[in-house]
Amino acid sequence: MSEHSRMPPLTESDLHAYADGQLGEARRLQVEAYLATDPAKAALVAAWARDNAALRSMLDPVTKEPIPIALAGPPAARATRWRQLGAAASIAVVSASGGWLMRGAAIVAPAEGIAAPSRDRLDGMAHRAAIAHVVYSPDVRHPVEVDASQEEQLVTWLSKRLGASLKPPRLTTLGYELIGGRLLPGSEGPVAQFMYHNGQGERLTLYVSREGARSGEAAFRFASDGPVNVFYWVDGHFGYAISAGADKRELERLAQEVYRQLRAA
């Protein structure tokens, strides 16, 4: 009886572990032998591996970012924060390999006078915005790096890193208050994430990135994956994405207000 025949049957978990490079030699060879007989499954596992590699490339540089003043503190406290950040990166990778791919994307009628941008590249930004929302919005103790009580410091720090003047929009009239923000790594440089919450404790995040930006172009688009909805657009030198559990109508209302304030500024 061969060694492979004595091993337990393969499961979906084995395929994910293979894509993550976490299988022992014998099990890895068994998976490779199976994939050689099923091209469709082999292509799927290869896509998982590519997603993992892309997310690690996107998230690993965060450990090299300078620690903002708000994170300054005793060495033990700083170590705890970095462990939490590492765990968040792991969650993002797991989310991707488990199928966190933007589905059901639909173009929404743009605001008056706004031209439609490239759809393909913005799907990538919306995907990353959704992952960042899933990773950080549930955090009760440290959802942001710099909180709203230090907004001036937050604005100065993020503006410097993104190379442009940034200011979180005021959404109080729509029922949302700023919690704070953080810096994230992106595919085309640093990304700013602002987080808000309403009276019911529901959170939304505004993701600001240079990815896919085209000067003078913008269009509102909507994408959904499971419990996360994303309303996103590009305007000037930045792309913007609002992520939340709120429905399409609510996100459109928020996006229009954010867009109005950005244009006014």
Image: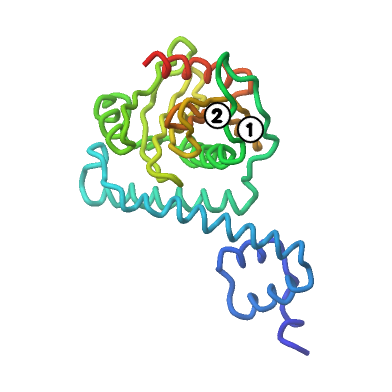
The residue that appears at 39% across and 44% down in the rendered structure is: 189
Residue that lies at the very extreme toward the top in this rendered image? 173
The residue that appears at 21% across and 43% down in the rendered structure is: 73
Seen in the picture, residue 171 relative to 69 is either above or below; the reply is above
Residue 252: x and y in percent read: 58, 19
The answer to which of 213 and 123 lies nearer the viewer is 213
Residue 236: x and y in percent read: 44, 27
Q: Quadrant of the C terminus?
A: top left
| Label 1 sits on residue | 223
Count every numbered label the image shows and give the total: 2
Residue 215: x and y in percent read: 46, 29
Q: Residue 35 shows which numbered tag?
A: none
| Label 2 sits on residue | 232
Q: Image check: 64 left or right of 263?
A: left
Seen in the picture, residue 1 relative to 166 is either above or below; the reply is below
- Is tag 1's residue or tag 2's residue first in the polypeptide sequence? 1
